[in-house]
Image (spheres, grey):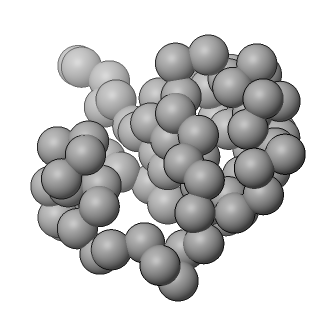
Amino acid sequence: MSKKMYKAIDFFCGGGGMTHGLCQAGIKVIAGVDFDIDAKETYEFNNPGSRFINTDIKRLRSNYFEKHFHLVKNDDSLIFVG
C-alpha cells in the first residue's frame, strides 16, 4: 500500500515553528506566508526547501499558488495551516 504524500502551505508562518513540525511529520511544506519581513531569515534557516512569501494575505491573489507552484484546486493532499 502506498503512503499518501501530503504537502502544506503555512499561513501566518512567523519563524516557521509549525512548518518545522509538519516537516518532521513527513509533510512537504511548500511555502510559508507572513507579512513580517523580519521573520524571513529565521523561517528559511529553520525550513530549508520551503519558500517564504512576504505578503499580507488580504493582497494574495486567489490563484497565486496555482500560478507560482503549479498546484491544482481541490487537491486532497494539500493542507492549509495557520
Which residue sits furthest bottom? 58
21 versus 18 height, above or below:
above
Residue sitting nearer the eye, 6 or 9:
9
Relative placement, left or right, of 52 versus 67 is right
Q: Residue furthest front?
A: 37
Does residue 52 sit above or below 79 in this rendering?
above
> In this orientation, does residue 78 appear?
yes
Which residue is at 77% across, 22% downward?
46
- Measured along the vertical axis of the image, is residue 33 above or below residue 3? below
Q: Residue at x 54, y 74 (%)?
A: 57
Quadrant (top left, top right, bottom left, bottom right) of the C terminus: bottom right
On the picture, is 28 further left or further right than 82? left
Total marks shown come to 0
Horizontally, is 26 left or right of 18 in the view? left
Q: Quadrant of the N terminus?
A: top left
Where 20 sits versus 12, above or below?
A: above
Image position of 8 (left or right of 16): left
Q: Position of residue 18 (x, y in %)?
A: 75, 44
Residue situated in front as seen by the camera: 76 or 41: 41
Give x and y (percent) for residue 34.
67, 58
Q: Residue at x 84, y 45 (%)?
A: 38
**Residue 74: quadrant of the picture:** bottom left
Residue 6 image offset from top left, x and y in percent: 39, 37
Give me the residue at 75% from left, 50% from top.
37
* Residue 29, visible in the rendered structure: no
> Where is residue 55 drawn, in percent x and y?
58, 63
